[in-house]
Amino acid sequence: MLFSIILGLVIGLLAGFFMKASFGGSTIIGFIVCVVVGLVGSFIGNALGRVLKVRSSVLQFVLDIVGACILIAILRFINIM
């Protein structure tokens, strides 16, 4: 349980960092907001894994990344980021 929370935090931080690095100066929001978006997306993926009763840590890792990417894509699509 604690490991999945820590893993979600790390994945969210990495997703936010890579999002900020890839979009560079084109985003009007700061680095902290990018990291928070990555964290929220990672927790969405984590929650999805719990609902689906995922037992594999590798699959949970993938779901965390997918959740963060989906949230970032949605926010980019509606021009919030």
Image (cartoon, rainbow, N blue to C red):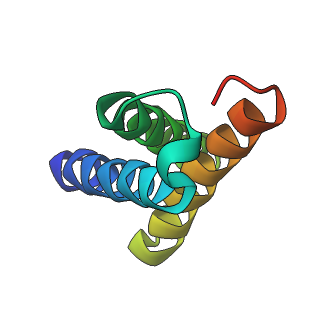
The count of marks equals 0
Q: Nearer the viewer, residue 20 or 41?
A: 20
> Where does the image place residue 34, in percent across and percent down from the top left?
42, 37
Q: Residue at x 19, y 55 (%)?
A: 3
Horizontally, is 21 left or right of 71 in the view? left
Q: Residue at x 82, y 36 (%)?
A: 77
Horizontally, is 76 left or right of 47 in the view? right
Q: Residue at x 34, y 59 (%)?
A: 14
Q: Is residue 54 visible?
A: no
What is the quadrant of residue 30 in the picture? top left
Horizontally, is 31 left or right of 54 in the view? left
> Where does the image place residue 38, in percent across and percent down from the top left?
45, 42
**Residue placed furthest toward the right:** 77
**Residue placed furthest toward the front:** 25
Q: Is residue 24 visible?
A: yes
Q: Nearer the viewer, residue 51 or 66?
A: 66
What is the quadrant of residue 81 in the picture? top right
> Where does the image place residue 47, in percent across and percent down from the top left?
52, 37
Q: Nearer the viewer, residue 55 or 4?
A: 4
